[in-house]
Amino acid sequence: MATPRRCTVARREDVVGAGPHHVTAAGVDLVLLRVDGELRAFDGLCPHQGALLGEGELDDGVLVCRNHGWRFDARTGERLGGRQCLGAHTVREVDGNIEVELGGGPDSTEAKGQRTREQLPGPRPWPLVGNALQLDAERLHQTLEGWAAQYGSLFRVKLGQRPFVIVTDPPLIAEILRKRPDTYRRIDRMEHIFDELGVRGVFSAEGASWRAQRKLAMGALDHRHLTAFFATLRDVAERLRRRWEAAADSGEALDVQDEMMRFTIDVTTRLAFSEATNTIGGEQSRLLDDLDPVFPGISKRLNAAFPYWRLLKLPSDRRLEHALASVRAWLEDVIAKTRARLEADPARADDPHDFLEAMLVARDAEGRPFSDELVFGNALTMLLAGEDTTANTLAWAVHFLLDAPAELASLRARIDEVLGEERVPAGMPMTRALDDIEAIANETMRLKPVAPLMFFQNIPAVTLGELQLEPGCALCILTRVAGNDPARVDDPAAFRPARWRDGHLAAEMQRSGVFVPFGSGPRICPGRSLALLEIRVVLATLLRSFELERVGRAEDVGERFSFTLIPTNLRVRLHRRASA
């Protein structure tokens, strides 16, 4: 066993105030708290799902995890209402530095697995192209899920000359997600593709660069900012309601995913950039059109057998690059206006009003401003992540509710009870009372997860279960398989939101890796709270004022994978409710 290690984790000026402050020591995540004037250091990952406790908050001597509200005594690390306790570490200030002493650990991290990647089962690869010709990019998830049923929870495929390990076992998925970013990272191809396209943001960043960008993203999406933003969110929802009233009066059939995209784009641009777009009203339809090919284009490149676009650009590649150039021009104008606003009112630097302002006034660990490329990349990341993922979940929720009349009637009755005379939720307390909608969202994401595939690679040599992996092995986790396994979920094919009203079961399914629609661990999606808030507001607005009629048959609704899981052929006709 190794002897305890003493590590410098920060300068004194970096940990001003009570905290919590996230730091790392020898690759270990820690949280620093100042209690009664004394610094305390604890393990930095929540024992529930591995969320970063440094991104939580202190509430009267209690450390609260941001993700699911687990509470820990800031003096002892003991969980309130549970048996778990955070590991404590000796901490001291020496010559202006904060030092933490870590306990001893194994001297070697050499993998000792019993199987190698080459010993895994899997479909037979073809020479040169591997299994690439057996995979359709838009149905990639379905093919891999079919192979999982044939080959088991660990199997291998080849894309070109690169082998991939496919993982569906929940404990192994949970382990991969919990051990990011130091043991596992996003696959390097993703970083290269994003860099080529000029989208260098928090999503594709790794290491120290990710930590600095993550802090800004989490700050922009914390509870305080979302509460202050609610009036704007309500205004956008009210404009969507008026659009739907016009569609109901005209009898127009609506593409559900397109309608939800209009809402999420307008919400994201206002929250992230204070930019009052009106995609709902059609004024920024060009922005909607430009964003449409981005995720499909990235997905196609990510799953290609080799980087063909460096030799020959197909029409889809030209559309992708043209769309990104158009979005870049729009964002550069927004960035220029934001810089001018900061110059005209320097006091805003001390209290940024949105994510873009915070990004422009922030400094990295060396005291330098973020580069223009990082500013643009993160602005585009916020725009893409904010509009596509939430819109898809909303659309899928409508799809399932249309075929579940009892669930729809029960949810509508609860919405009527909570909203009263309101047509749109009037505030955060009213929205928080709509827990039934979050149950609908969770059941929707179990059946149609936004990200059915996630690509990673290990950094050092590791043992994953009984599998020995040398550094840099490509991994793909399938997030839907476990949640549809009858051995883990009762009657998995049924749409039953009631299963999520048991808070203990929901927490266990997330902790164990069975249900990870937002990821898990330190890199859990920073927009999770905003997404669930938007879902509550939109479904409440829709069902409070309208009856829904499906256009076409339910069996004709398909799913298309293009980085996220998109519904196809999903249309509805709205009718004003007689009682609304």
Image (cartoon, rainbow, N blue to C red):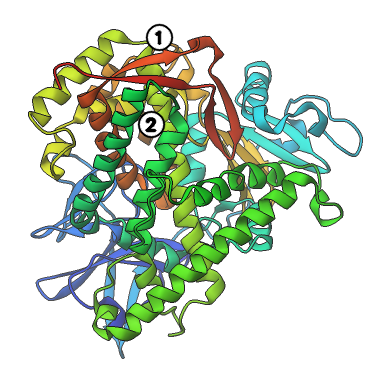
Q: In the rendered image, which residue does mark 2 sit on?
A: 394
Q: Locate the C terminus and report the quarter of the image it occupies.
A: top left
Task: From the top left corner, tell me how far across and down residue 200 is, in percent.
Answer: 57, 64
Q: Which of 31 and 404 is in front in this view?
A: 404
Task: From the top left corner, tell me how far across and down residue 86 is, in percent.
Answer: 26, 53
Q: In this view, does 436 lie to the left or right of 164?
A: left
Mark sitting on residue 491: 1
Task: From the top left corner, tell me how far across and down residue 346 is, in percent.
Answer: 28, 85
**Dot 2, crowdedness within 10 Å: few (<14), some or many (≥20)?**
many
Q: In this view, does 335 lie to the left or right of 328?
A: left
Secondary element under disc 2, as helix, strand or loop, is helix
Which residue is situated farthest in the right direction here?
127
Task: From the top left corner, tell me how far across and down residue 239 is, in percent.
Answer: 28, 42
Q: Residue at x 51, y 31 (%)?
A: 479
Secondary element under disc 1, as helix, strand or loop, is loop
Q: In which quarter of the image is residue 498?
A: top left
Separation of disc 2 and disc 1 at Cα? 23 Å
Q: Quadrant of residue 349?
A: bottom left
Q: Which residue is drawn at 76% across and 42% down?
A: 304
The type of residue carrying mark 1 is Asp
Q: Which of 273 and 299 is in front in this view?
A: 273
Q: Which residue is drawn at 55% across and 48% down?
A: 291
The type of residue carrying mark 2 is Leu
Mark sitting on residue 52: none
Q: Nearer the viewer, residue 131 or 200?
A: 200
